[in-house]
Amino acid sequence: MKTITDLLESKGRDIWSVGPDATVYEAIELMAGKGIGALMVMDNDRPVGIISERDYARKVILQGRSSSETPVRDIMTSRIIHTSPDSSVEDCMVLMTGNNIRHLPVMEDNQLVGMVSIGDLVKATIDEQKSTIEQLERYISG
């Protein structure tokens, strides 16, 4: 079974972030530019939250706020649910589903070392199943 370390080795360990005083507009602009759905909110080197497209939709658009005037700290999710590099892909899927989140920071020794999305986990699961099917087909066909 694949671990998060395996997944990060194949997808990369890039972590995109903003500071808590950045505007929501700046955060959304960075997400759009990088083609991602969430950013870590970092105060110096310390993670203090996460901001996602969902936060933007629910806490800016629906509340009639201005994205160019609202600081990230006002809408970020402060409770950071995270995993470790040695966790399995399956365990992370359970964690994310149970907490209704789509992005999961990866922490090791109190340091942020990566971020995985539900899409990353689904892709890893499909790849693993495909490999298993191919092995079974080779075994059956001799």
Image (cartoon, rainbow, N blue to C red):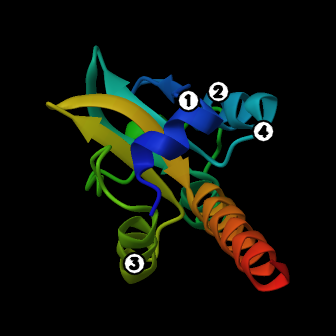
Residue 14 vs 86, above or below: the answer is above
Measure the alpha-carbon separation of dots 2 and 3: 32 Å
Going by the numbered disc 1, the residue's amino acid type is Thr
Going by the numbered disc 2, the residue's amino acid type is Glu
Q: Residues within 10 Å of mark 1 (few under 14, many from 20)?
A: many
Closer to viewer: mark 3 or mark 1 = 3
Helix, strand or loop at label 2? It is: helix
Q: Is residue 74 visible?
A: no
Going by the numbered disc 3, the residue's amino acid type is Val
Whichever of callouts 2 and 3 sits on the residue coming sooner in the sequence is: 2
Query: Which picture quadrant has residue 56?
Result: bottom right
In the image, what residue occupies the spot 44% across and 34% down?
Answer: 114
Going by the numbered disc 4, the residue's amino acid type is Gly
Whichever of callouts 4 and 1 sits on the residue coming sooner in the sequence is: 1
Whichever of callouts 4 and 2 sits on the residue coming sooner in the sequence is: 2
Location of mark 2 (residue) = 26
Location of mark 4 (residue) = 35
Q: On residue 23, which mark appears? A: 1
Location of mark 3 (residue) = 94
Measure the alpha-carbon separation of dots 1 and 2: 5 Å
Q: Residues within 10 Å of mark 2 (few under 14, many from 20)?
A: some
Residue 108 vs 43, above or below: the answer is below
Measure the alpha-carbon separation of dots 3 and 1: 32 Å
Q: Mark 3 near mark 4, Cβ–Cβ under 8 Å? A: no
Q: Mark 1 near mark 2, Cβ–Cβ under 8 Å? A: yes
Whichever of callouts 3 and 4 sits on the residue coming sooner in the sequence is: 4
Query: Which picture quadrant has residue 66?
Result: top right
Helix, strand or loop at label 4? It is: loop
In the image, what residue occupies the spot 79% across and 28% down?
Answer: 33
Residue 53 lies left or right of residue 3; in this view the side is: right
